[in-house]
Image (spheres, grey):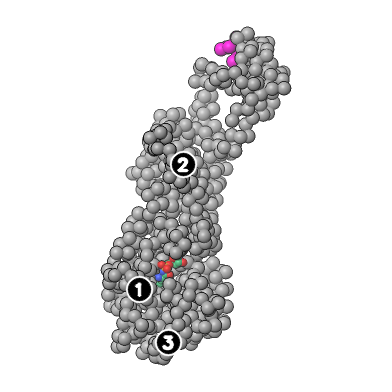
Amino acid sequence: MAEPFYVTTPIYYPSDRLHIGHALTTTMADTIARYKRMRGYDVWFLTGSDEHGQKIQRKAAEAGISPQEYVDRIVATFQELWRQLGISYDDFLRTTEERHKKAVQTLFRRLEAQGDIYKSTYHGWYCTPCETFWTETRLAQGCCPDCGRPVEKVAEEGYFFRLGRYADQWLRFVEENPDFIQPPSRRNEMISFVRGGLEDLCISRTTFDWGIPVPGDPKHVIYVWFDALTNYISALGWGTSEQEKFEKYWPAVTHLVGKDIVRFHTIIWPIMLMAAGVAPPRRVFGHGWLMVSGGKMSKSKGNVVDPMVLIEKYGADAIRYFLLRELPYGADGYYTEEALVERYNRDLANDLGNLFSRSLAMVERYAGGVVPVPGPATERETELAAVVRHSIARTEQELERLDFAGALAAIWEVVDRANKYVDEAAPWNLAREKQTERLHTVLYHLVETLRVLTVLLAPFMPGLPPRVWPQLGLEAAPQLQEWESIHRWGSFPPGAKVKRKAPLFPRQEGVAAPVAEAATPASTVPQITPRKEVTLTEMATVSIDDFARLDLRVAEVEAAERVAGTDRLLKLALRVGEEERTVVAGIAQVYQPEELVGRQVVLLANLQPAKLRGITSQGMILAASDGEAISLLTVDRPIASGSKIT
Ligand code: MSP
């Protein structure tokens, strides 16, 4: 029987629409869920909405509608976002559902019956945005120590949960389960929090009514965190006569949460469970925050980034890629649209996209679009295979420990190696030199690499495989799309027909700086219509910096003569500004020496000198060639010799 794997996201407050920080946790959860499914686990992936509490009740009142109506509207936008982002959850739990309310009340009753809940009066502080109680001593300059916002004084009758009673049991549990809290830095933080003393937790409120009533005392509603945390088992049917899911998936769970709510998940939640006689969760992972300019995203700062807008602009796969790649393991990451576009263009359009299109273009051009039978592998192929093998192993390890950025970095080792492989193996030369067997070997290893990459990337960018498989001619070969198949290097079936389509990730223009409303009437501004996509994909793209390393100059031919003993070579004496250069050029069959004298040509001046027929050639003059005809590059109008070409 397949091993169970249960993964959860926090249930989000439907007080507002979700932003890109929320999309981060859910994308992580989706990626690990998809990966585990590919590895044959029996996966259950839960997300949902945390709909009760004072904050929501206030928001609804401000909007002049009932809390239920308010949350219904916002929850619909959550579900739409997850649809657009390709989130493959198995269940979406809303805390206003009957199945959940019943479980929360069952848990409350059970703890009360065994004396773990008692009635008293709460005197202290409350942070409504965080829905958190604080004692005077924990406040930071009178404000919430988590979010820094003002707190409200509370003095009300309440039910208390005997959290303190379980402190030792908790410490023992954490010691015996070193992997429970991840990453390890957060574990140490939580241990010192508990060692500092655990107070009993107030778990009911009386000053508003948008919540689950305390059984037998409906003047009180259950504290929203007690309510919310229970979602992880209420969604599995815990406490009902239909508990099969609970029995199957609990406690094989990974709770993914942001660092701000690690305390609730690693201290309060396991203690609630311990008290109820239920095993604590197996693993809680607290990831860092996605920061934006201005720090944390907040409505009041006006720096909230809407993921829907980005998905529309760049596509879901690109947004998922950015989120997963940008946050170093356990640490914070930063979002700017410029950084997003830069990553997109560098990693997706250039590195990955070009590798696909240039490889497929070459199979089409040099092998009629049919994947050829490879000849014997050389050292180059052995090395490529070793990089692939190593990258697969590392991707698997990184995903196990939820280091998504590390896993993607491992996958990009293959992308980089494969691009180098193309440049080094230079299939265009093999084609010209008619080294067909070698050419076929190279083309075969390239498509095999593309297949492996597509499988590796499937959990991260689920929109990619459905676009790639038809291009590789593998849409009807599900066994070659499975994770296990990438451990069998060389499985690509020769004879498959490739079909190159539009680029996977068309380059994005830079982000336009906000322009003040133009003074020029729009009609006088020349309109640039986007050019049709032309793919000249044999060579890797170069950056503008790469181009700047070429010293291209205008040179004047002062003298020209044939090189004795060849019918191809001309020796040219060039003037380049103050300097004289000698260059040997293979143009004698097309140009007579005398017709060149006085002409301006384009010289690559910093090419490493080379000896040809005993003459040192100090550069290269540029010419266009269609394979037969040769045409020298020249300048459009006379210009000082030595002028730089930029
Ligand atoms: N409702 C509670 C969770 C209850 S779980 C039983 C809650 N909701 S929330 O909507 O405020 O936040 C949900 C999650 O979003 C948290 O894990 C939080 O860390 C995360 N994030 C909110 N802003 C974030 C970023 N800017 N970056 C990354 N994650 C962020 O808390």
**Label at residue 155:** 3
Q: Report the span colored magenta.
A: 586-592
Q: Secondary structure at mark 3?
A: strand
* 50 relative to 536 in the view: left or right: left
Residue hosting label 2: 509
Give the dominant element type of the magenta stretch: helix, strand or loop: loop
In the rendered image, residue 305, in percent from the top left (x then y), is placed at: 43, 57
Question: Which kind of residue does numbered mark 3 sit on?
Answer: Ala
306, above or below 125, in the image = above
**Label at residue 12:** none
Q: At 44% from the left edge and 68% from the top edge, which residue is drawn? A: 255
Residue hosting label 1: 58
Question: Which kind of residue does numbered mark 1 sit on?
Answer: Arg
Classed neighbour count for the residue bearing mark 3: other residues with Cα under 10 Å, few (<14), some (14–19), many (≥20) = few
In the rendered image, residue 395, in percent from the top left (x then y), is placed at: 51, 54
* 311 relative to 188 in the view: left or right: left
Q: At 66% from the left edge and 12% from the top edge, which residue is drawn? A: 560
Image quarter hosting the C terminus: top right
Question: Which kind of residue does numbered mark 2 sit on?
Answer: Glu
600, above or below 401, in the image = above
203, above or below 627, in the image = below
Badge 3 or badge 2: first in the primary sequence = 3
Q: Is mark 1 within 8 Å of ligand 1?
A: no
Image quarter hosting the N terminus: bottom left
Badge 2 or badge 1: first in the primary sequence = 1
The answer to whether the residues at label 3 and label 2 have Cβ atoms under 8 Å apart is no
Q: Quadrant of residue 242?
A: bottom left
**Of circles 2 and 1, which is in front?**
1
Classed neighbour count for the residue bearing mark 1: other residues with Cα under 10 Å, few (<14), some (14–19), many (≥20) = some
